[in-house]
Amino acid sequence: QVQLVESGGGLVQAGGSLRLSCAASGRTFSNSAMGWFRQAPGKEREFVAAITWSGGSTYYADSVKGRFTISRDNATNTVYLQMNSLRLEDTAVYYCAADPTMETYLYWGQGTQVTVSS
C-alpha cells in the first residue's frame, strides 16, 4: 500500500551536489522507516542511509557519512537525500525504500541514476 516515485538524479561534476527526492503515497508512510540504497554497474545493492519513522534517528554507510543527509517530511510524504561533495564512486542507481514493519523493506522506488563525472 506504499508507492514510491524518485526524482532528482542526473549528471554532476565531482565535488558537486544533488538532492534526491522520493514521493510516497499510502497512509502507512508516516509509520514506515525509510532508506536509500544504491547499485553500481556490476555491483550488488548497498545500503546508503536510513531514517526512522519519526525522523529522530538517522543512519549512514561509512562511505557517505558526513557528505550525505537523509531527511523526511511526513506532512508531504517525501523523503530526501542531500548529497554533497560527490565522488566518482558515488555513481550508481539510487533507490528509496519503505519499511512499514521495522523488519524488512517491502516497497521500492524505480530508481534514479546519479552519475558523477570528473
Image: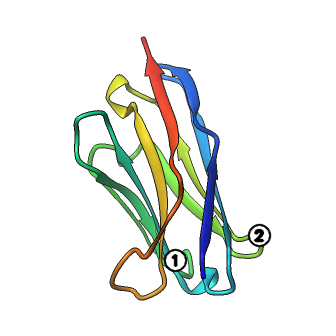
| Location of residue 45 in the rendering, given as x and y in whole percent from the top left corner | 29, 51
Task: Name the quarter where the C terminus is drawn.
Answer: top left
Give the quarter of the image for residue 25: bottom right
Q: Nearer the viewer, mark 2 or mark 1?
A: 2
| Marking on residue 76 | 2
Residue at far right of view = 76
- Label annotation for residue 74: none
Residue at point 42%, 65% (across, down): 50
Q: On the rendered structure, is 78 left or right of 32?
A: right
Q: Residues within 10 Å of mark 1 (few under 14, many from 20)?
A: few
As helix, strand or loop, the secondary structure at mark 1 comes to loop
Residue at the extreme top: 118
Whether the residues at callouts 2 and 1 have beta carbons within 8 Å, the answer is no
Residue reaching furthest left?
Answer: 43
Report crowding for label 2: few under 14, some 14 to 19, many 20 or more residues within 10 A (C-alpha): few
Residue 4: tell me if it is visible. yes
Residue ID for mark 1: 56
Is residue 11 placed above or below 73 in the rendered structure?
above
Which color scheme did the rendering employ for the protein? Answer: rainbow
Viewer-closest of 70 and 43: 43
Q: From mark 2 to mark 1, how far is it between C-alphas? A: 17 Å
68 or 4: nearer the viewer: 4
Q: Indicate whether 76 appears above or below 21.
A: below
Seen at 60% across and 82% down, the residue is 1
Horizontal side of residue 6 vs 69, given as left or right: right
Q: Amino acid at mark 1?
A: Gly
Name the kind of residue labelled 2 in the image: Thr
